[in-house]
Amino acid sequence: MSINIKQLTPATAIHPGEILKDELKERGITQKEFAQLTGIPQTQLNEIIKGKRGINADVALVIGKALQMDAAVWLSLQSNYELDEAKVNKKNIERIAALDLWQMVKSYVPEKYFKKQGIITGNPVQDIPVVKSIYSVQNFDQLATLYSQASYSKFRKSEKLSVDKINLVGWTKLVHYLADQKVVKDFDVRKEEELVKALNEVFRKNKNTIEKTVQVLAEYGIKLIVQPHPEKCAVDGISFWSNGNPAIGISIRHKRIDSFAFTIMHELGHVFKHLINNNTAEFIDLDKEHNVPEYKNSKEEKEANEFASNSLIVNDEWKRFKTSNPSFNKVAIVEFARINKINPAIVQGRYCFDMDYYGIKSSIDKTLY
C-alpha cells in the first residue's frame, strides 16, 4: 500500500528561518551582511532565522532576489511550516487526550500480555482503536460492564480462584477478535463422525499436529485459534459462534498430545452437543483446579468430557480393555492403541483422566509434535 507523504505528520515543523540560516552559512554570508544587502533590519532578520517571525510576501521577494531564487520557494516554505505546525499541534492534543484515556483503559485490559503478543504497541493513539475493536465497544464506559456478563461473572464467585479476571477476559476477547477475521468452509453438523476420524488420524501420526488440526477443522467449517494464555490465567479452551461458524480457542498450556487432543475434543463436544442449539452460548474452560464447582459439575461440562473421552476411544472397547488389563502396563497400552489406531499417549491419557491421576510414569512419548 502506497503512502501519501502529504498525509504524514512530521515530528517537528521546520521554520523557513532554519533553512535560510543554512543557506547563508553555505554561501559564507553573515547575518549582518545579508541585512545590509536586503535592507531587512538585522533584528527582524535574526527573528526570522530563530523562527520567531514568519516570512511574508515582501520579505520573500527580497530574499529571493538577493539569493537569486524564486520568491515562491520561500512563501511555500513558510506555508508548509504553518501547515506542519498545525498538524503537530493537533497530534499533540490527540496524544494528550489518548494518554488521559489510556490511564483509565489499562485497568481493564491485560496491557502487559497484549504488548507481549504484539497486539498493542505502547502508543495510546494507535492502541485505543485496537482495544475498542478487540472488546467490541464504542466507548470505554462499556468495558466495566463486560465483567458482569454471565460468561465471566462465575469467575468472581470463589475468592480462592487464582485467576486474573482481566487476563482471562482479555484472552477470550482476543480469541473472539482473531476468529472474526478467519474464514473457513461451511459447517455441517452431520459430518461429526467424519471429522472425528480425520482428527484421530492427525493425532495418531502426531506430526505438525497443531497446523494440521487447524486445517482439518477449517475444512469442516470450524475455526481454531491457538493463542498462548496470559499469566495467572489457567485457561485451556473456549468455544463459541463466530460469523456463522463454530469457533474454538485453545491455549496449549501443556505441550502433550494427549492434553491437546482432549482439549480439542472437549471443545468439539460443546460444539456438537450445545452450540448447535444455541448460537449465543460461550463455554470457557479453565484448568480443573481453577474452575468453580458449579461449572465443573454442570451438565454441559460432563457431556463435553464424555464426548472427549468416548469420541476417539469407543467406550465399550475401553471398558473391556480396563477389565482385562488391571495393571495397565505399557505393552498393553501400545497393543490396544495399535489395534484401535489411536496414539498410545492418548490411551494413557484416557486412563489418567478416568483415575483423575496424572502422575503415572511411563516411557510412552507424550510430546506434542
Image (cartoon, grey):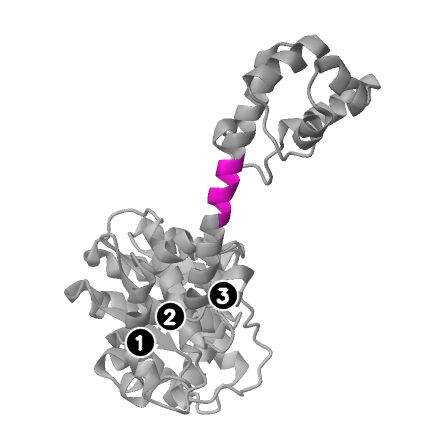
* Magenta-span inclusion, residue 89: yes
Res 2 seen here = no
Q: What is the distance, in whole Å, between disc 2 and disc 1 at their CAs?
A: 7 Å
**308 above or below 319?**
above
Q: What is the distance, in whole Å, between disc 1 and disc 3 at their CAs?
A: 19 Å
- The residue lying furthest to the right in this view is 28
User: Residue 53, how many percent across, how many down?
Assistant: 61, 31
Asked if marks 2 and 1 touch (Cβ < 8 Å), the reply is: yes
Report which residue position mark 2 lands on.
169
Mark 1: amino acid: Tyr
Q: Earlier in the sequence, mark 1 or mark 3?
A: 3
- Dominant secondary structure (helix, strand or loop) of the stretch shown in magenta: helix
Q: Is mark 1 on a helix, strand or loop?
A: helix
Asked if marks 3 and 2 touch (Cβ < 8 Å), the reply is: no
Q: Which of 309 and 239 is in front in this view?
A: 239
* Magenta-span inclusion, residue 153: no
User: Residue 186, how many percent across, how many down?
Assistant: 24, 48
- Residue at 20% across, 70% down: 274
Q: Is mark 3 on a helix, strand or loop?
A: helix
Q: What element carries label 2?
A: helix
Magenta stretch: give its range: 85-92
Callout 1: few (<14), some (14-19), or many (20+) C-alpha neighbours within 10 Å?
some
Q: What is the distance, in whole Å, between disc 3 and disc 2 at their CAs?
A: 12 Å
Q: Which of 86 and 323 is in front in this view?
A: 86
**354 above or below 208?**
below
Mark carried by residue 152: 1
Callout 3: few (<14), some (14-19), or many (20+) C-alpha neighbours within 10 Å?
some
Mark 3: amino acid: Glu
- Residue at 71% across, 11% down: 66
- Residue at 25% across, 74% down: 149
Mark carried by residue 111: 3
User: Residue 59, how many percent across, how many down?
Assistant: 61, 18
